[in-house]
Amino acid sequence: MQTPAPSFAELLRVFGRIGLINFGGPAGQIALMHKTLVDEKQWIEEDAYLRALNFCHLLPGPEAQQLATYIGWKLHGLRGGLAAGLLFIIPGAVVVLGLSILYAYAADLSPVAAALLGVKAAVLAIVVEALLRIAKRALGTRLKQVIALTAFIALAVFSAPFPLVVLGAGLIGFVVAARRPDLLALKPGGAAAPAAPVRIRGVLLTISGWLALWAAPLALAFLWLGPDHVLVEVGVFFSKLAMVTFGGAYAVLSYMAQEAVSAHGWLKPAEMVDGLGLAETTPGPLILVTEYVGFLAGFRNPAPFTPLLAGTLAALMTLWVTFAPCFLWIFGFAPFIERLQHARRLQGALAAITAAVVGVIGNLTLWFALHVLFARFEPRGFGPLTLSLPAPASLDWRAVVLSLLAAVLLFRFRVGVIRTIGAVLVAGLAFYVVGPR
């Protein structure tokens, strides 16, 4: 039974608390909100919660944050959606900014580097665990398995563009759903429930308004600093990323790493792994790792600002262009939620994209493993292909030991993510204390 809508002050208190303790990635965050908002507070009914969750799965971006935004919108309109969505990300964003500043100034210190080696090893085990968990849930048919394998090969061997892989999978699912929905394990659709009328003019005004807000900081930086400034580059890159973040942060990390490391030179591969480790230890969506990347990009290309100011501005730009679209999707398309639940082809596109995401995360896992365990890479030719393969002599035995420790803690003893990172971090420091200087 649904209770009366809470006051706005109570909504602020509850979502403020959720924002402070929403560790554990999207699965843990969705479970936390279900327990708080459905079971305890009874602000939203079970069926409505699940419909909203399915709707958020159709959207690019962090589904847990978008779900919080939708529930806030359902309870208190625009201000409720803004409050719930912002409170979900602000605590984690503040912590990630602080950790990014510490990293920029202290990462080269030997004890910090030793601790970060432990963090990298833990991240490798965490990503492997995520790959296995998502694959078990998402690859229920032979077609889905083929899509996942194809996505992996396209990315790992042929370096296909990530957006093209995602859009291609979505197109396959869109077509297959109309003819053979059983190949994607789509449930038979029932009769469409009556849906409330939607005012198209209001929807268009909402979308155009949020598009203008999304573009405003980027346009200002373009006019003030020119098209080649790092703030503009960061804004453009993460705006594009926000359009293709289906499947959560893990799905886009390899693409983000490839672009940030190779194309832009903002950071090194090992630093990308460090950033994911830092983001894993904070509340909020894992996609907050983009803030860390943005900060380092600005910090290392500061003119005409100081490094700290440039990094902070770039981090804020990254946050804005990453999360402003989330509010656009919710406020613009939430009125259609009942209709979208019966859109079979969209469900098929989502199912195929989810399968492709498994292959994408497989590529990410391989990329992380190689850059955590090996220090040097060499180009090798295979006919028309040239692959960058690790040099066997550069294998870091400490990283191997720490990765195995993290795997044992996660898989054998079922230790949580935060405790695993903490334990392996301490082990990394122990190598520094007892090992050669």
Image (cartoon, rainbow, N blue to C red):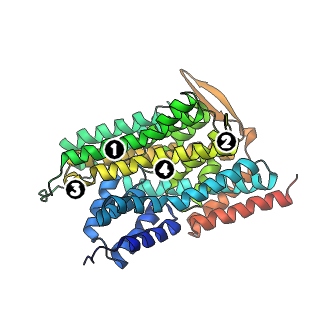
Tell me, for residue 168, which label it has, or none: none
Q: Which secondary structure, mark 1? A: helix
Name which residue type carries label 4. Answer: Ala
How far apart marks 1 and 2 lie (CA) works out to: 31 Å
Report the disc number at residue 187.
3
In screen coordinates, is 42 left or right of 437? Answer: left
Residue 214, percent from left and from top: 42, 42
Residue drawn at x 21%, y 48% is 344
* Separation of marks 4 and 3 at Cα, in angstroms: 27 Å
The residue that disc 2 covers is 299
Q: Which residue is mark 4?
A: 249
Residue 369 visible to the viewer? no
According to the picture, the residue beneath numbered tag 1 turns out to be 209
Which is closer to the viewer, label 2 or label 3? 2
Q: Amino acid at mark 3?
A: Lys
Q: Quadrant of residue 114?
A: bottom right
Tell me the distance, in whole angstroms, between the alpha carbons under discs 2 and 3.
50 Å
Which of disc 4 and disc 1 is earlier in sequence? 1
Q: Is residue 231 left or right of residue 145?
A: right
Instruction: Provide the secondary structure element on which disc 2 rests.
Output: helix
